[in-house]
């Protein structure tokens, strides 16, 4: 990411998206508590401070090739849609949803 820090458009987009993420408060959204810019090994970097989740990502669950029970799959979809709907109501559009971003506490399988 340090190479992008030279592009003012990237820096401004990061700042706007970090501020928007920091305003989201929903049970199915990880809290962003801070963001900023720092120097690391002589390079400027951007960072986010996020809530820690002790669990795993959906793509890790699906790596084994086993199908999820339909009830669990439906519950995951409902929770994801609820979070996205809340973001949309606040004018935030997530442009890059993927399985690796859905995280789960505890064990399901």
Image (cartoon, rainbow, N blue to C red):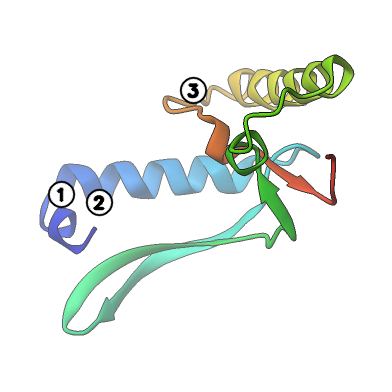
On the rendered image, what quadrant is the C terminus found in? Answer: top right
Q: Position of residue 84 (x, y in %)?
A: 64, 23
| 12 is higher (above) or lower (below) than 98 | below
Mark 1 to mark 2 CA distance (whole Å): 5 Å
Query: Which mark is on residue 93?
Result: 3
Q: Nearer the viewer, residue 85 or 60?
A: 60
Residue density around tag 2, few if under 14, some if 14–19, many if 20 or more, within 10 Å: some
Q: Position of residue 106 (x, y in %)?
A: 85, 51
| Contact check, label 1 and label 2, Cβ < 8 Å | yes
- Nearest to viewer (mark 3 / mark 1): 3
**On the image, which quarter does residue 39 sit in?**
bottom left
Residue density around tag 3, few if under 14, some if 14–19, many if 20 or more, within 10 Å: few
**On the image, which quarter does residue 80 sit in?**
top right
Mark 3 to mark 1 CA distance (whole Å): 21 Å
Q: Is label 2 in a helix, a strand or a loop?
A: helix
Instruction: Read off the residue under disc 2.
Output: 11
Image position of 12 (left or right of 56): left
Q: Nearer the viewer, residue 17 or 28?
A: 28
Residue at left offset 68%, top offset 50%: 56
| 76 is higher (above) or lower (below) than 39 | above
Residue at left offset 54%, top offset 39%: 100
On the rendered image, what quadrant is the N terminus found in? Answer: bottom left
Disc nearer the start of the sequence (2/3): 2
Q: Is label 3 in a helix, a strand or a loop?
A: loop
Q: Position of residue 30 (x, y in %)?
A: 67, 48
Mark 2 to mark 3 CA distance (whole Å): 18 Å
Residue density around tag 1, few if under 14, some if 14–19, many if 20 or more, within 10 Å: few
Query: Which mark is on residue 8?
Result: 1
């Amino acid at each position: 990411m340090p190479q992008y820090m030279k592009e003012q458009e990237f820096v401004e987009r990061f700042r706007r998206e970090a501020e928007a993420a920091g305003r989201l408060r929903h049970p199915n959204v990880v809290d962003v508590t801070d963001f900023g810019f720092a120097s690391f090994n002589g390079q400027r970097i951007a960072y986010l401070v996020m809530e820690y989740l002790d669990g795993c990502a959906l793509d890790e669950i699906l790596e084994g090739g086993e199908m999820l029970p339909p009830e669990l799959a439906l519950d995951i979809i409902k929770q994801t849609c609820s979070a996205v709907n809340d973001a949309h109501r606040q004018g935030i559009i997530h442009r890059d949803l993927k399985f690796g971003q859905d995280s789960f506490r505890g064990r399901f399988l």
